[in-house]
Image (tube, rainbow, N blue to C red):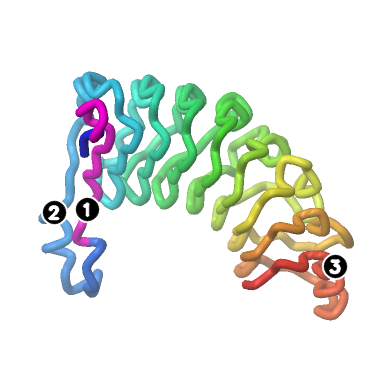
């Protein structure tokens, strides 16, 4: 898509559009793969210097690493790499995307050793999904959760192998008080939800804690969530 004002290319949407169709994943695997992109991502993409939207989701790049040059798209506001077959470490160069509003890295074979080296630099980020990434090796994983951008509205960390107890997560951080949706399911936290831990997230509408190993009385747990006056789900 080009800008109506400047005619520059501003949007490149190459997601596998077969995912948009109602289909059975098992019986239609051949058709799904037929529409799947792969191979090397060429640095020639940098010629599209005004790009603000890039979607490569639901393709299969064969566990190749996310190219570091993606961090050179200084105008990028939207980056979706969902289930695109990337592997290796998340490049810290993503921290250069200081205009980014939406970042989805979910369902890839990715890991990050030092989240705080790039995540807090995304000061305008509103949506972050790192579900199904292996964050167990992140030496600063818990610390990074206390340092997300204050602009963040949606944070999904489902099935991330977080090495923490629920009570050790810095969910009291002032940077998390504007969250509307928070997903922490499938991380096998084996402890109760402490009193007041989520109490300052008064904007929260959706909370996902399924697939954990939470303990304690249901009545007390619900009481500890009682300050979440806007909770819908």
| Quadrant the C terminus occupies | bottom right
Q: Is residue 31 above or below residue 70?
A: below
* Image marks 2 and 1: residues in contact by CB distance under 8 Å: yes
Q: Residues within 10 Å of mark 3 (few under 14, many from 20)?
A: some
> Which residue is disc 3 drawn over?
224
Residue 5 lies, in percent from the top left, at 26, 30
**Viewer-nearest residue: 192 or 222:** 222
Query: Is residue 5 on the magenta stretch?
Result: yes
Between the C-alphas of marks 1 and 3, the distance is 42 Å
Return the residue at label 1. Answer: 16
In terms of image quadrants, where is residue 231?
Answer: bottom right
Q: Residue at x 67, y 38 (%)?
A: 150
Secondary structure beneath disc 1? loop
Q: Earlier in the sequence, mark 1 or mark 3?
A: 1
| Mark 2 vs mark 1, CA separation in Å | 6 Å
Judge left or right: residue 161 versus residue 21. right
Q: How many marks?
A: 3
Distance between the Cα atoms at labels 3 and 2?
48 Å
Q: Which residues are magenta?
A: 4-18
Q: Which residue is mark 2?
A: 35
Horizontal and vertical percent for residue 28? 16, 69
Name the foreground residue: 124 vs 209: 124
Closest to the observer, 89 or 171: 171
Question: The N terminus lies in which quarter of the figure?
Answer: top left
The answer to if 9 sits in the magenta stretch is yes
Sequence-earlier tag: 2 or 1: 1
Name the residue rendered at 63%, 57% in the picture: 180
Query: Disc 3 or 2, which lies upstream in sequence?
Result: 2
């Amino acid at each position: 898509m080009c800008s109506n004002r400047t005619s520059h290319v501003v949007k490149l949407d190459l997601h596998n559009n077969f995912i948009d169709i109602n289909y059975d994943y098992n019986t239609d695997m051949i058709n799904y793969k037929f529409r799947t992109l792969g191979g090397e991502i060429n640095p020639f993409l940098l010629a599209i210097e005004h790009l603000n939207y890039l979607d490569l989701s639901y393709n299969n790049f064969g566990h190749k690493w996310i190219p570091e040059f993606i961090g050179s798209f200084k105008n990028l506001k939207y980056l979706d790499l969902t289930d695109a077959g990337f592997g290796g470490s998340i490049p810290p160069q993503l921290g250069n995307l200081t205009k980014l509003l939406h970042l989805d890295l979910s369902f890839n074979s990715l890991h990050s050793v030092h989240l705080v080296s790039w995540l807090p630099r995304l000061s305008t980020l509103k949506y972050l999904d790192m579900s199904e990434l292996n964050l167990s090796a992140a030496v600063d994983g818990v610390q990074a959760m206390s340092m997300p951008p204050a602009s963040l509205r949606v944070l999904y960390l489902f099935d991330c192998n977080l090495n923490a107890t629920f009570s050790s997560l810095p969910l009291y951080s002032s940077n998390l008080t504007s969250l509307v949706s928070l997903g922490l399911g499938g991380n096998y936290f084996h402890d109760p939800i402490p009193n007041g831990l989520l109490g300052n997230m008064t904007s929260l509408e959706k909370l996902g804690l399924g697939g954990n190993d939470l303990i304690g009385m249901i009545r007390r747990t619900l009481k500890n969530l009682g300050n979440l006056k806007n909770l819908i789900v």
